[in-house]
Amino acid sequence: MPDDSESTSADLKLPLLDQLEEGPWPSFVKDLKQQASRRPQVAQLLQQLEESYENRWDYWRGTVLNVSGYGGGVIARYSDLGEKYPDVAQFHTIRLIEPSAFVYNTESLRQLADASEEFGAGILQLHGMTGDILLLGFDNEKMFAAAEALMEQGWDIGGSGNGMRTIPCCVGPARCEMSCYDTLKLTSFLTKRFIGELHRPEFPYKYKFKLSGCANDCANAMTRSDMPVIGTWRDDIQVDEQAVADFVDRHGEEWVNENVTSRCPTRCIHLHGRKIEIDNHNCVRCMHCINVMHAALAPGNDRGVTLLIGGKRTVRSGEMVSTMLVPFMEMKTDADREALADLVERIWEFWGEHGHDHERVGEFIDRVGLGTFLDGVGIEPDPQMVLNPRSNPYIKFEEYTAPRLEGEPQKAANVLPREPEVTEIPFGGD
Amino acid sequence: MADQKKPLAPRDQGAPDYTRYLHPSMVRNYGKWKDHRDIRPGVFVHVSEDGDSLYTVRAGSPRMMSAPLLRKVCDIADRHCQGYLRFTSRNNIEFQVEQEEQIQPLIDDIEQTLGFPVGGTGRSVHNIIHTQGWLHCNLPGTDAAGVVKALMDRLYEEFTHENFPQRVKLSTSCCTINCGGQTDIAVNLQHHHPPRIDHDMINRCELPKVVGICPVLAVRPDRVNGHDTVEVVEEKCMYCGACHAQCPALEIRDGDTDTLSIWVGGKSANTRSGPSFMKLATWGLPNNPPRWPEVGEAVSAILNAYKGGAREFERVGEWIERIGWKNFFEQTGFKFTKYHIDTYRWSRTTLNASSHVRF
C-alpha cells in the first residue's frame, strides 16, 4: 500500500496509464505526472484514474455545490475512493465564462494558471464542450477562495445546472472575411444582458447559445445549441469578375463545374466561360461557392443573422438539429441586439411557463408543436420554417372550430373537454 | 468581525473584456479582412483591405493542461506573438504572427517547447472534441482523454497533413447522453441493461423528477419495504441513462458489458447539404483501455474507404449519401444488421421509401 501523501511522480505505479505516455500526440498522462510532483492531489487523481482503467469503472459522485449568490458555475465532484485517496475526496471544478472567440493575452492566462495552482490541482481545460474555461481540483473551502480571487481579477463563474450556458462564438470579424456580423460583440452583449440567467438557473433545463458568423458554423451551433445565431445576408453575393476569370484560368472550367457549380444545393450558380452567374433569389447562403472561390466571391453587404431554435444532443428524445425561427434579423446596433434579447425573453417566458422539468426548448416545441410555440412567443409563421407543409389533414382550425358555449350539453357523454388529470400517484402513502 | 472580508456576493461582471485580448493586428483590421490563403497544413494567412497580413499557426493541444504547461504556452506567445493567442472550438491553440519569416521559428518553438503538433486545418483529421470521462465526470462508462490520445497517436500523420477529400472531424462520448458533438466520425458508449436500482440510496433523489425524465415512461413509482422508490419496466427501457443522470441510485453502467459503437456522417455546417446527424456504422467494440485498439481499427477502416471513394469537398456524410449505405458497408467491411435499422422516433423517415436500389 503506497503512502499516498508522499507520492511523487517517480513513485506512481500506473501500468495502464503509463502506456498513454508513448506515441506522438501530446500526452496528458505525462503532463499530469509532472504536475503530480508539484501537487499531491494530482498523484491521487492519476491513481484513481488508473483504477478506472483497470476496473472500467468511474469513481466520481456529482452533487450540487454553489458559491454564495450563484446557482451555477461549480461542478462538484466527490470521490467514492475518498478514504483511499483523501486528497481528491473533494475535487471540484470551477467553470469560468470565457472571453468572446476564445481570445486571450498571456497575462490573463497566467492569472488562471496561478489561481488554479494556488487554490487547486493546477489543471486547466481550454475549453469544455459547452465553451467554458474549466479549472479542476478544488476542495470545498478552496473552491470559494479561488472563485473570490478570480472574481477580484475580473473573471466570473457560471454556466451549469438548469440555466444559460456560457456562449462560444467563432473568431468572427476579428480574423475572418466571411463573418456577416460581430459575433464577439453579440456574445459579450448576451452574456452581460443575461448574466442573471447564467448565474442563477431557473429554466426547465439548460439553454445554450452558439454564435457563428456564417453558415460554415465554426461554433458548431446548429447541432449543439438551443439557439444558433448564424450570420447571413439578404442582397447579392459580391462577385469580383476579374478574380473569377483568374480562378477559372487556374483551375479550368471542368473543375469549377465539378466542384463549385454542381455542388450548389439549389443549382443557382452557373459558369459561362470565365463568367459566373448567380440566381441570388434562389441562393440559400450555404457558403460553398464562397469557401472555394474566396478571392472571387464574398457575402453580400446587407448582412444580419438567421436565428434558429431547438438543437441538442442525445439524452432523452434523441438527436435534434435546430430549425428555422427567424430567417433574417439586423444585427448591427445595440438596438438590434436588444431586439434579439427581447425575443429570447419571450421564448424563456413561454418555455419557462409551460416546459416540463428537464425539457430542452426543442423537445418542448416538439411536444406543443411549432405553430403553438410561434403563437406563444409572438412570431408569424414563415414557409422558410418548414421543408414542406403538412401532408396529413388532422388540423384544429381555430377559424372553424367554434368555442363551446358554457352549459352547452355534451354531444356524447364520453367526450370530455380535456383529459382528466391524474390525481393519485402512489408516492407518500399506502 | 469588522475587518473580515465581505463575503462573496454575486458581482455579475460577466466575461472579461475581449477587446483587451485581441492581437494588435486583429484590432487594426477588425471587420476589414479581405481574403485568406493556406500556406501549409496548420498554417494560413489572412489579408486585410489595408494590405496587412496575419499568419496563424494552429497547434493541436490535449485540451487538458497543467498550469506549468499553460505557462509554457504563454512563453511562446510572449516570445513570438506579442503576448496574444486564441483557442479554437476543437481545442487547438492558434499562435499569430505578422511576418512570414516569423512562422518557422514559431513552429520550431511550439514543437520543441510544447511537443504539440502543427496541423488540424483544411483537409486533415482535425483535433477531437471530447468529454470528461473517468478523469472527472460522474456518469461515464469509459474515458475520453485516453481514447482521444490513443486515436490521435494513430491519426497523427493525418493531423499534420492534408490528405483527405475534405476536413474530417471526430468526437467521443463516454455515455449515451453524448456530450460530444455531431461529427464525421464519433466513438460513443453503449449500455446494454436497464438501470440497477439501489432502493437504499434512492431517497436522496427527487422521485417525481426521476419518473418524469424517462423518455419512454419505463420508470414508474413503486414502494419497496414501506419506502417510496421506483421500478423500471425492462421491456420499455432503451438504456438511455437519462434517469441515471437524474439519480445516481439508478446505475445504468456496467464495466463488464458496456461496449463502444462508431457513428458516421454528422456535420454541423450548413455548407452544401446542410447539417446532418451521425448514423450507426458499427457496434459491439470492446471498451478496452488504455488504447482501445479495436476502435482505432474501425476508425481507420472508415477513413481509408472515405479517402479512396469521396470526391473533393465531400464530407463523410455527403460521400455516403452519394454512394449509398450499401456501398459504405461493402467498402468498410462492417456488417449491416437489424440493429442498424432505427426503432426510435421518426424511424419511418429513415427507411428507403422508393424503388431505388444499387447493384
Image (spheres, grey):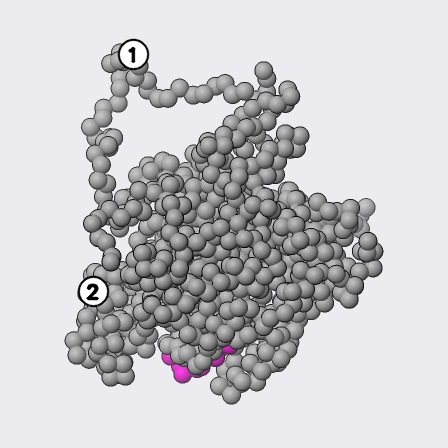
Above or below, A252 against A167 in this view is below
Point out residue B267 in the picture as x, y percentages from the top left corner. Answer: 39, 58
Residue drawn at 54 percent across, 53 percent down: B286
Left or right: A170 in relation to B251: left
Q: Is residue B318 covered in magenta? A: no
Label 2 belongs to which residue? A268
Above or below, B24 against A398 in this view is below
Specify start and end residues of the magenta stretch as a single range. B49-57
Point out residue B31 in the picture as x, y percentages from the top left corner. Answer: 41, 71
**Quick one: SS at disc 2?**
loop
Label 1 belongs to which residue? A413
Residue A74 in sight here: no
The answer to which quarter of the image holds residue A417 is top left
Residue drawn at 16 percent across, 76 percent down: A272
Amino acid residing under circle 1: Ala
Q: Nearer the viewer, residue B142 or B283?
A: B283
**Quick one: SS at disc 1?**
loop
Q: Nearer the viewer, residue A196 or B352?
A: B352
For disc 1, the chain is A
Point out residue B16 in the picture as x, y percentages from the top left corner. Answer: 57, 61
Other residues around mark 2 within 10 Å, as few (<14) / some (14–19) / many (≥20): some
Count of numbered badges drawn on the protein: 2
Point out residue B124 in the picture as x, y percentages from the top left corner. Answer: 44, 71
Residue drawn at 53 percent across, 39 percent down: B193
Image quarter hosting the C terminus of chain B: bottom left
Nearer-N-terminus badge (2/1): 2
For disc 2, the chain is A
